[in-house]
Amino acid sequence: MPIISIRDLVVEYDGRRILDGLNLDIEHGETLVLLGGSGSGKSTLLRQILALERPKSGSITVKGIDITRCSTAELKTVRHSLGVAFQSAALFNSLSVRDNVALTLREHTKLAPSIIELVVWMKLAVVGLGDFGKLHPQELSGGMKKRAAVARALALEPEILVLDEPSAGLDPIVAAELDDLILLLKEAFQMTVIVVTHEMPSAFRIADRIAMLYQGRFTAIGTKDEIRASQNPRVRQFLDRVPEDMTKTSAIADYFEKYLQTQEAYR
Amino acid sequence: MATVLESVGRRTISELDYVGSLNIQLWATLRAMGSALPFVGNRYRWQATVRQILQIGVDALPMVALMAICTGFILAMQGASELRRFGAMHYVIDLVAVGFTRELGPLLTAIAVSGRSGSSFAAEIGTMKVTEELDSLRVMALEPVEFLLAPKYLAALISVPCLSIVSNVCGIVAGGLFMFFSTRLAPPLYLRYVLDSIVLRDVITGLIKSVAFATIIAHVGCLEGFRVRGGPDSVGRSTTSAVVKATFLVIVSDAVFTAIFYFTVKS
């Protein structure tokens, strides 16, 4: 039974369809990379999986609970098994890194403060920030912030780890270090990992499977090799870095047509 | 004509939506307030409440005291300039004492707190929204209403009435200083006249008002923060809006409370 199951998911913002009838199963212990260009709906799908927004129709089942219709108590149970590191890290600036990681442990467990301190140190050590707990998020570099966010996401030892654009805005070396970290975590904790990214090298390094989104639909779902060998034009365009022909989009074509008409009228 | 009606209708619906949101938020906060209470609630929420009491109450003390002293002097001087012509200088004492306990003490405090803390609530929550910290709280199974709003509201409910009492005392002391320097009225005698002129009901109605003002300031400030959409510029707009709306609603509610007390409680 898949740990996450998405069925006929439709999401609309102000009548504009963002996700159009998505179906996807994510198996226990696999690393799934959601790949897609800007505006393809990756982050929207992620927000749906995290139950931060409600869909227009369809369902998302996490560990057997339909999070689009469940009660607040059930949603809380589901969220205890989720660890999330947001694109912006979203660390609480008013708290030190250590307190950021300790927050969920203090709120959701009855562990003694000394045990919490130990667990926090261990989580920070896993991501290479064992000596940086006292610092505040604003004192960290971009890569360190992302690592701290991962440490916070790991605090309750979640079954599902969700990472939104972990390599965005980082230099290639730090991005590669983060990829190593994801692989290490997967091996050490046997967790299901969902990674949203548009960084191809990173995706092919960490993924078991890749789901590629284009204009709110999955254009391809498969293993790394299947995606690499895919002849789907959208997948090929993405893999081969072929730019979109901007003049073929209707809005730009309309603009040029009107512009030419005005120029002719002036003559 | 249709456009005007349409615009009025749209504005009315928007204002009703705002009032509705305020009420929903108030109800949700009241339900979550138990967690912010000492001894019976969550230890960390109570610690947050104490920090907020220091910020809303203690930090605002010098400003509120100075505003009350200045206003006490102004009221006494303006009153004296007219009452002196009728040989009724002793009524200045009634004017200052009753004016402050019933009206000016709570109102001045509310305006000061609205400017300091209402804007700070909006900026804090708005920034957290923009930086995905609120989403981060939700996915950690921590409700922002319980985590952020309940401590702020409880702190405002404790701080604003206390500040109002300080404001009353400072205003009355300023009136006493004026009477001493202008008529050589001895302070003990001034105090006796003050105690003769005010009754317990005056103090209680003032405190009831300050509780209502605290509710308005905390909830308008937080709601403006939660309604932030977009980037940092909208945080700035919401901060301004929080102060403007809270001050406006404080004055309107003051008028309503004064009318209620005037028509229902006869002296």
Image: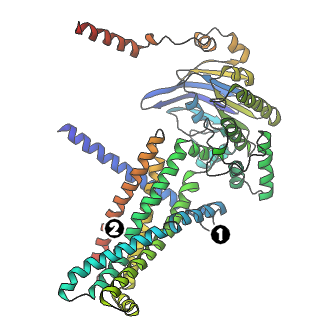
Decide if residue A231 is on the left or right side of residue B182.
right
Q: Position of residue B88 (x, y in %)?
A: 22, 88
Label 1 sits on what residue type?
A: Phe
Tag 2's secondary structure? Answer: helix
Vertical placement of residue A213 versus B230, above or below: above
Pick the residue in front: A132 or A147: A132
Which subunit holds the residue at mark 2? B
Which subunit holds the residue at mark 1? B
Label 2 sits on what residue type?
A: Asp
Tag 1's secondary structure? Answer: loop
Vertical placement of residue A267 versus B18, above or below: above
To which residue does mark 2 refer?
Answer: B254
Residue drawn where x is 67% and y is 25% of the image: A33
Q: CA separation, marks 2 and 1?
A: 34 Å
Q: How many marks?
A: 2
In which image quadrant can residue A252 be found?
top left
Task: Judge the density around disc 1: few (<14), some (14-19), many (≥20) Cα neighbours within 10 Å.
Answer: few
In which image quadrant can residue B86 be found?
bottom left
To which residue does mark 1 refer?
Answer: B39
